[in-house]
Amino acid sequence: MNLDASLAEQERAWNARPLLRRVYSEWYRAIVERLSAVHGRSLELGSGIGRLRDVAGDRIVLTDVERTRWVDEQVDALHLPDADGSVANLVMLDVFHHLADPARFLDEAVRVLAPRGRVVMVEPYCSPVSAFFYRRFHHERTDLSADPFAPDAATAAAPMESNQARPTLVFYRHRDELLRRWPGLTLVEERRFAFLLYPLTGGFSRRPLLPTWLVTPLEVVERALWPLAPLLAFRCLVVLERRG
């Protein structure tokens, strides 16, 4: 399936599933709250169907690796078109694990970000529980044995290919190597979350498993489960900042 057709399916799921919209809108708000206020433009990479604009408005430039009807610009995250030190924010939701060469992207982020500019992302996290479900019930690859920073021929083959384990490998299991190789970046925040509510939405591709009336009680349960995030989390939020 090509990117345009895949995004059209996502848009249909978005319009039909209020619980999915609620969960993702909360993630978008978390991203917007963490944006840097330094001078420069802010780009969302891999904007998909462009729903970040519902929360961020016109302060974000929507981009994707292919020109689609949902975005403002066609931008390759591995070859950013911006001048050195000119970007305030690079935003990604479910994009980092699709990158064919994460090291190349991190090089580009260091180059284009202004001092105190940020990369803000929400990505899959592979806890013992979520890795089990990702491998058995999700169509995307989950390979925790992969080299965290090496180019990936499989993800280079098509925009929708990925390795869902990549964020866990780069920002958690090999964090020391990340910070050693890219001293221009500092990790200012990481948070693991999404224990029950997100998987029960069914995401964009599966039938929802949760009636709407259970959402509020489950939000209470999720807060109580916070100390178990390393064991249960399905998602992580990561904020990198360009050193001044």
Image: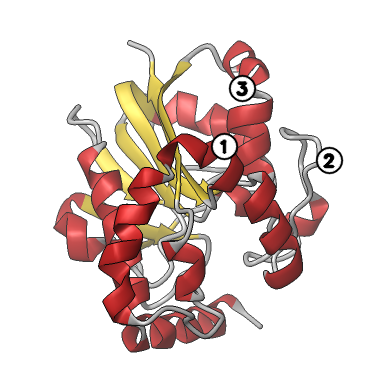
Q: Which mark is residue 145?
A: 2
Tell me if 42 is positioned left or right of 141 in this view. Answer: left
Looking at the rendered structure, the secondary structure element under dot 1 is helix
Q: Which mark is residue 175?
A: 3
For marks 3 and 1 on the same chain, the one whose residue lies earlier in the sequence: 3
**Mark 2–mark 3 CB contact (< 8 Å):** no
- Amino acid type at image mark 2: Ser
Gap in angstroms between the C-alphas marked 3 and 1: 15 Å
Looking at the rendered structure, the secondary structure element under dot 3 is helix
Identified at 57% across, 28% down, the residue is 107
Q: Quadrant of residue 166?
A: top right
Q: Which mark is residue 141?
A: none
Q: Which mark is residue 230?
A: 1
In depth, the one of 214 and 64 nearer the eye is: 214
Determine if residue 51 is in view: no
- Amino acid type at image mark 3: Arg
Q: Quadrant of the C terminus?
A: top left
Q: In front of the other: label 2 or label 1?
A: 1
Identified at 57% across, 76% down, the residue is 3
